[in-house]
Image (cartoon, rainbow, N blue to C red):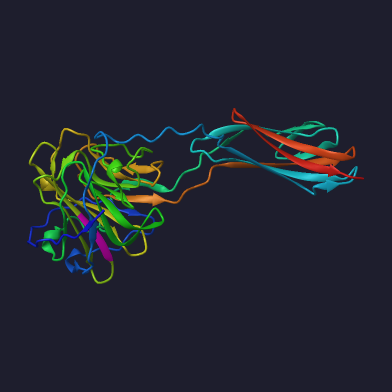
């Protein structure tokens, strides 16, 4: 793949009101002042445009193999070797590693070498059996955007890149993506230095290829494209329009990558103008800005939102139609699933190698077995 470089023409254009969506894992930015912005003189380089592969629809994820149970059971008995009439304490923990809440029934049993004499968090129902109360374990939450909401005063709004020098112009056609090397930035806690810019009004963080080009899609969705920042995802076409402009702006304190689309609604000559601003200042800071006067409803659905790298978490604007306000996307770190723990006490009765076995039903059974030696 050859690499190309485009240099922008510069022209002054009147400012328009903004709509922004920022993704932030760190604190919100301080009050901003667009009048101090100027080019940071950072040269950007891009690959040649890549066209969509296959049909012009969102590409389905491959069929996944049958998943293992989301229930993870661990069990440890201390000490692992005891004498007859001495005791060991076994700690059992169940964790939900799946995304959905699940209910678990836990039963611990021994055999002739060991009798259960007590339990904490469970009930010994007979010498060889203890049962824990049924527990509901919350599902694990992946890292990713969790909300798209207004955040006035912390975002720049639409400032046309043609008001600045040093722009990089990226011509795009219909159903194409252009990969652009950029200064490092944070998204969902991961550092990236490449953006895939789709003609259909979204970015693929980390870069993309023809399989990441789709005229419309859902957020979140494991189907490609993933790791999407979507200021205005709908069926758009850069043919006969300016295409995409890119620059790095600074206010003397912070820097922002700015991507501006000037593309047509598919099948029309109606130019839609909007931007994504991405801070490179050590925290996640992604903003969507719109030239509202250019926006018009098309025949395809419009999606405004952001998604994580696996398509398992994301957030969308609550606006059903065209954007009407500034927005910031807030991301959150992943959160493990719920857990439940209990202990049982087992006494050595007969010499030999005994077993403590716990079964968790969710309703599918998960079993863990721990040997305990009774040696004298």
From this view, report whether residue 242 is shown above or below residue 95. Answer: below
What residue sits 29% from the left and 54% below the top? 195
* Furthest residue toward bottom: 252
- The residue closer to the viewer here, 166 or 162, is 166
Q: Residue 126: give x, y in percent of width and height.
A: 80, 29
* Furthest residue toward top: 363
Which picture quadrant has residue 87? top right
User: Is 334 a magenta residue?
Assistant: no
**Count of marks placed on residues:** 0
Q: Residue 336: give x, y in percent of width and height.
A: 53, 46
Q: Residue 294: give x, y in percent of width and height.
A: 11, 46
Would you say residue 373 is visible in this rendering?
Answer: yes
- The residue closer to the viewer here, 192 or 11, is 192
| Extent of the magenta region | 255-259
What residue sits 21% from the left and 69% below the top? 41
State left or right for residue 280 relative to residue 325. Answer: right
What residue sits 75% from the left and 44% below the top? 90
State left or right for residue 370 relative to residue 294. Answer: right
Q: Mostly what secondary structure, the magenta segment?
A: strand
Q: Residue 218: give x, y in percent of width and height.
A: 31, 37
State left or right for residue 31 relative to residue 64. Answer: left
* Furthest residue toward front: 1
Q: Quadrant of the C terminus?
A: top right
From this view, report whether residue 295 is shown above or below residue 108. Answer: below
Would you say residue 134 is visible in this rendering?
Answer: no
């Amino acid at each position: 793949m050859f690499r190309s470089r485009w240099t922008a023409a510069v022209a002054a254009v009147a400012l328009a009101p903004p709509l922004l969506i920022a993704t932030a894992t760190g604190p919100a930015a301080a009050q901003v002042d667009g009048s101090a912005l100027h080019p940071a003189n950072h040269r950007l380089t891009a690959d040649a445009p890549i066209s969509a592969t296959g049909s012009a629809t969102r590409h389905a994820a491959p069929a996944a193999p049958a998943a293992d149970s989301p229930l993870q059971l661990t069990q440890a008995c201390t000490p692992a070797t005891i004498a007859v009439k001495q005791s060991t304490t076994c700690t059992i923990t169940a964790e939900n590693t799946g995304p959905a809440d699940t209910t678990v029934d836990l039963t611990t049993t021994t055999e002739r070498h060991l009798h259960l004499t007590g339990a904490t968090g469970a009930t010994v129902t007979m010498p060889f059996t203890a049962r824990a109360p049924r527990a509901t374990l919350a599902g694990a939450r992946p890292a990713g955007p969790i909300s798209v909401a207004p955040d006035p005063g912390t975002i720049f709004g639409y400032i046309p890149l043609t008001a600045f020098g040093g722009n990089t112009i990226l011509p795009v056609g219909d159903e194409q993506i252009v990969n652009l090397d950029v200064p490092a930035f944070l998204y969902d806690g991961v550092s990236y230095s490449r953006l895939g810019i789709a003609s259909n009004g979204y970015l693929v963080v980390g870069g993309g290829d023809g399989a990441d080009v789709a005229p419309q899609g859902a957020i979140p969705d494991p189907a490609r494209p993933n790791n999407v920042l979507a200021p205005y995802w709908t069926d758009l076409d850069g043919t006969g329009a300016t295409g995409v402009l890119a620059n790095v702006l600074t206010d003397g304190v912070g820097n922002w990558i700015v991507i501006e689309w000037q593309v047509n609604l598919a099948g029309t000559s109606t130019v839609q103008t909007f931007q994504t601003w991405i801070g490179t200042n050590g925290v996640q800071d992604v903003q969507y800005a719109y030239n509202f006067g250019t926006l018009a409803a098309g025949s395809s659905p419009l999606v405004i939102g952001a998604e994580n790298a696996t398509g398992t978490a994301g957030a969308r604007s609550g606006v059903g139609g065209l954007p009407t306000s500034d927005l910031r996307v807030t991301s959150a770190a992943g959160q493990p699933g719920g857990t439940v723990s209990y202990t049982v006490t087992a006494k050595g009765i007969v010499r030999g190698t005994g077993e403590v076995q716990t079964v968790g039903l969710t309703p599918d059974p998960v079993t863990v077995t721990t040997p305990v030696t009774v040696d004298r």
